[in-house]
Each structure stands twice: as C-alpha cells, then as structure tokens.
Amino acid sequence: MANYLTKRLIYMLITLFGISIISFTVIQLPPGDYLTSYITELQASGTVVDEAQIASLRQRYGLDKPIYVQYFKWITGIFRGDFGRSFEWNESVRVLISERLPMTIAISLLTLVFTYVLAIPIGIYSAVRQYSFGDYLAIFIGFIGISIPGFLLALVLMFAFYHMFGISIGGLFSAAFEDAPWSWAKFKDLVDHLWVPMIVVGMSGTAGLIRTMRATTLDELGKDYVKMARSKGLPEWKVILKHPVRVAINPIVSTVGWELPRIVSGTTIVAVVLSLPITGPLLLQALLSQDMYLAGSFIMMLSVLTVIGTLISDILLAVIDPRIRLE
Amino acid sequence: MVDSVAKNREDILLEVKGLKTYFHTEYGVVRAVNGVDITFPRGKVVGVVGESGCGKSVTALSIMQLVSQPPGKIEAGTIMYYPEDEAPIDILSLNPKERKMRELRGKELAMIFQEPMTSLNPIYTVGDQIIEKVQVHFPMDRNEAKEYAIDMLNKVGIPDPAQRVDEYPHQMSGGMRQRAMIAIALACDPRFLIADEPTTALDVTVQAQILILMQDLQQEFGTSIMLVTHDLGVVGEMADVVAVMYMGKVVEYADVQTLFYEPRHPYTRGLLRSIPLIGQSGARWLSPIEGMLPDPYDQIIGCSFAARCPHRTEQCQHETPPWLESEDGRGVRCWLYA
Ligand SMILES: Nc1ncnc2c1ncn2[C@@H]1O[C@H](COP(=O)(O)OP(=O)(O)OP(=O)(O)O)[C@@H](O)[C@H]1O
Ligand SMILES: [Mg+2]
C-alpha cells in the first residue's frame, strides 16, 4: 500500500511538471503577446502608440526574453507563492485567483455531491427493477440530461423564471448582498441561488452516472456470487446492497476524482451564461487577451485539482478493492 | 444388493414432482426442466447425471428457488420438504423473497455452486462470507461467528485456518476456494446439500481430495446430498441412488448398483457404454451415443430421446412416454417398459 502510494505521488509530480511546460507553451503559441493585443486595442480607439514606450513595457514585463527564461521565472515564482501579475487587471494573479477559487471549489463539490447522491440510488433502482416503469423513466430522463447542453438549460431556466415569477436567477447573490459582508442572510441568499448552477452543471454528469451505475449493477446482478449470497438466507435488500452493488460501485466511487476537473471545466460556459463569479469566465477572458501569467496559473490550478482528484481516486480504489490493495 | 431407494414416507427428505422450469428468452422458450421427478432419501447421496444442458443446474436452482426471474419461471410442480419434526413444506408455494424461504435457505438447504471462481465475492474475505451466513441463522456475535468460521475452515481441511479466514478469494488456489465454498455451504448444518459439479473445475488429485472430504462430512453430519455431475465414475464412487436426466426430464431413477448392472433406459445404457474402459486396449471410448442433442428451443413431440434411440418405435415418435415406477422404487421413462 505504501509502495503503491509513493509510486502514485511520483507520477503525480512528473505529470504536473509536464503540464506546466505544455500549458505555458500553448498559451504562448498564438502570434504576438499581451502587448500586441494591447497595441491593437489602443490603435482601434485612435490612440497613437509610441515605439519607445512599448519597448520599455516589453522589457518591464520580461517579454523580450526567450520563452524558456519566461517559463523559468514563472515556475520558480510559483514555489515562492508568486504567480506573476495579470497585465489586463494590473493586479497580482494570486489575488485574482483567491477571490474566485473558493466559490469555484464550493460549487464544484456541491455539484459532485448532488450528482452522486442522486445518480447512485437511481442507477441501483433502475438495475434491480430492470424494464419497470421507473427504469424506463430513469432512462428517458437520462437521455434528456445527456443531450441538452448545460448552457441551453441555463438560458431556458433563466427565461422561464424571469417570465413567470419575474425573478432573475443569474449570479450567486441578489443585488442587495453582492458586496455585503458575510451574514446569515447573505448565506441564505447564496443557498437560494446555488441550486441553479448545481442542477445545470450536474445534470449531464448525473445522467451519465445513472447509466453507468445501472449498467455495472446489471452486470453484477447475474453473477454466481449473488445467487450464493441468496442461498445463505440473507434478506434480499442485504443481498443486493452488500454484494452486487458493493462490487458495482467500486469503479464509480474510484473515479470520483476524475469527475472534479470535468465539473470545473464544465461550469465555464454555464458560468458565463449565469454570470457566476467563479474562475471559468476569468480564464476564458485571460486566454482571449493573452494575459499569460493569469491564464497559465489558472491552468496550473486546474491541473493540480485534476491530479489531486486522480490521486484521491487511486487511493479510494485501493481502499475499497482488496484485489488492488493486496497486489 | 444394497437397496437405497426410499420405500416409506419417513425415509424421504425431499421430493420433486412434475417440476417444469422454463426460460422465456428473446428467441423463444427454453424448456430447461420439463417434468422432473426425483426423490431424495434421508441421509443418502443422490447422483444426478446427464449431458451438458440437460437441466441439472436448473433443477438444483429450482429447489433453492434461486432461478433468476425473469427470464426463468417455475411453471409447474411441487417440491415437498419433510423436516424431521415439523409439517411438510411445499417449497414452491413459498415466495422466494420471504422469510420462510430465507429460513430454509442456508439453514435447511444449502448449495455448492458449479464455479468456485465466480461464486465467491472477490471483495470480502472468506471469513466474512461464512460469518455473514452464520449470523443470519445463529444468534452469535462477530467474534463467536468468526470462531465458528475458523472451525468450519478447519473441518474442510484448509491449513492454518486462523490465518486463512482473513484471506480474500483471489489469494487462494482453486482447490482451496472450493473447500471454502464447501465450508460456507456446510455452515449451520443444513439437512440437504446440493453439490453442483463440485469438482469439475479442479485437477484430478484435488478432485479426489474434495470428494473424499465430502464423503467424510456426509457421514459425520448425515446430510442428504444431491450430487450433480456428468462423471459416472464419481457417481459410482459416491452415490447411493442415481437419477439420469435427458433434455429436461428424468429418464431413469434407481439404486446405484441396479443402475450400473441392469440399466433400463436406452440412454442410460448408452451412457454406461461410453465410459472409458481401462485395461482394454488402453483407455478407449466405446460406442458413444449416436446423434446430437436437439435444439433447446424446439418443443419435442413424443420421447425426447427417440431421434437417437436404437429401439424407437412408431409410438415413441408421437407419444411422450409416462413415468413408470415399480414397487422397488426405481423408475424409468420409456415405452419399452410400459
Ligand atoms: N438464465 C438462463 N436463460 C436462458 N436459458 C438458460 C438460463 N439458464 C439455463 N438456461 C438453459 O437451460 C438449459 C439447461 O441448463 P443447465 O444449466 O441446467 O444445464 P446443466 O445440465 O447444468 O449443464 P452443465 O453440465 O453444462 O452444467 C440449457 O439449455 C441452458 O441454455
Ligand atoms: Mg450445470
């Protein structure tokens, strides 16, 4: 077990190192840099741009150095907690991220819990009562959940709520609480708003998970060890939950970590539609304007989440499955 | 001649009559068990033999009410169980999921499954899989149940049972797994044990060990056993009584010696002739039964063996032969004896 963990940890560090190089390079790939987009913007608004001024800016930001020097500066900075500056916001990247990251993680985790709590029991029910009315209903809802894109559902919900009740369900807070300090009332306001992104973002994941849970449970239900469990005289519910479900749930619980980055990136477009103050829209903007330290740091952040998620998955898998733990 | 066939009611532990179990699949109805009658005398071993697919396992599962429904369905029949000091019970009248059936399962009726590889749950220790059964039927706490499990593993000849109890199935060899299965089945002292080809998945030396073990345990506990196999050698070694199955029906039922020395049904005679004879120009398969098994989806008119039978008459091809029972308890399903 200790061996297994050390191995995973080493892989994790190598992966992160690779990702940091690739993401930094990819961000630099489009022609030009932040300053070229900045100049185009200035010219578009009719401002005359002074060559000398640009050269000095380029030097100040280190944009005149070769790319590997820039990478080195950035990556060593990260170890000191310095993620560089955002050109566009003229603000340290760390501040920008720390404003939005907690809410991103909160929404993602909530969505994750929502997805699993809903999908696992439905999937089990669907498998145990295969071809019943409830099973067909679950399959039908599952298809809809998978085929409707999240942003469309978000738009429909926003329109419907505005049209019917005259309330806006965008954002995470009502206007009154937007800048207010944290209080019980503000928290309640947040909860009132949270369910929308939770459902919208969680929908396709839930639908997919129902299908997986149903299929894996169905696979296990016919196995001999289930008959064996019945032959011992166990009550039926105990047979089902303790045997086929417990085996079928293994791959699902153990991939919980992979779901996390999927949700984080899945939220971006929904967050744009619903104007949620989370990381997705900020990253999108940073990529568009080649705000490289901000974009790079975000991507690193998400990669760390992904890799940690995978590590959690690996550990869970070892904990719940003796065949892996004892290998 | 040793006579093991039950003659009195009191000698019978379990009696299957007119059992029909069908599978309703997409492609049609499989009449897997199509009129089975078998009597299981108390404390005896009944060998059930027949070619692959003739319905041996489905008969066994029907007795335990473990046939998966759907696609399976028990269409007709009675399975009477005669406990020593209680009123007889028709197992088929019980709801498979309700308490009464669950109390019979494990405590009175137990089963060793055909595949030791897939019949143990890979994610629980062998001990857990015994303990879970013991705790359903006996008022024991976990520690007592674990002691009991270790004791059972010891009885079935697993070395170091106190360590093995905490091992997972994948850490054991095939023979050890089969012993573990037997330990699970024999926990709680069932009166009736179904052993569905308990040794086919094992190599020959281990096969012999397991059979000897089962024989010892049978003698120690006085359990009645339904021993499913297609190995007539095993039957000769272990069984007191034999039921020969063909295409979902029992075609002959007799005392093991009677069956071996005076087989009646042409199919039984064919089976006995196809045993390899050692010493006669090496081991040689003598005249295997001609012809192929018919398609399981076909509904057969007349005797199901007629197509392959050397003695068939006009009647055999049109009328199903009745079950003919003689006074000595042996039975045959063939027009030759009508
Ligand atoms: N779940 C099922 N669905 C459909 N058909 C089935 C099912 N289980 C068994 N059958 C069919 O029932 C028939 C009898 O099967 P059974 O398993 O009882 O054979 P068997 O005598 O035990 O053979 P073997 O010696 O190979 O174990 C076969 O034709 C089989 O295909
Ligand atoms: Mg079988």
Image (spheres, coloured by chain):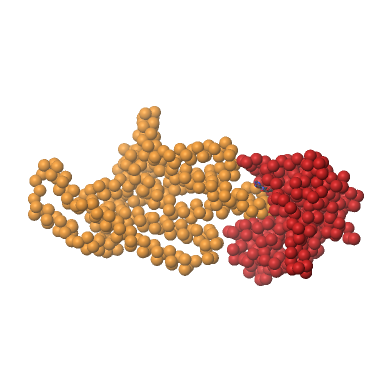
Chain colours: A orange, B red
> How many numbered marks are there?
0
> Based on the displayed image, in which of its 4 quarters is residue A75 positioned?
bottom left
Front residue of this view, candidates B20 and B259: B259
> Based on the displayed image, in which of its 4 quarters is residue A56 positioned?
bottom left
Instruction: For residue B26, say whether it is visible.
Output: yes
Front residue of this view, candidates A115 and A105: A115
Picture coordinates of residue A83, whole percent (x, y): 27, 58
Q: Seen in the image, is B196 located left or right of residue B325?
A: left
> Based on the displayed image, in which of its 4 quarters is residue A187 positioned?
top left
Q: Seen in the image, is A190 located left or right of residue B324?
A: left
Picture coordinates of residue A65, whole percent (x, y): 18, 61
State the residue lying farthest toward the top: A164
Picture coordinates of residue B309, whole percent (x, y): 78, 49
Residue at 59% from the left image edge and 63% from the top image edge: B170
Instruction: For residue B221, say whether it is visible.
Output: no
- Taking A24 as reference, is B299 above or below it? above
Picture coordinates of residue A44, whole percent (x, y): 14, 42
Residue at 9% from the left image edge and 46% from the top image edge: A48
- Taking B180 as reference, is B160 above or below it? below
Residue at 55% from the left image edge and 62% from the top image edge: A323
Q: Seen in the image, is B11 located left or right of residue B72?
A: right
- Taking B286 as reference, is A290 above or below it? above
Residue at 63% from the left image edge and 54% from the top image edge: A225
Q: Seen in the image, is A169 located left or right of residue B227?
A: left
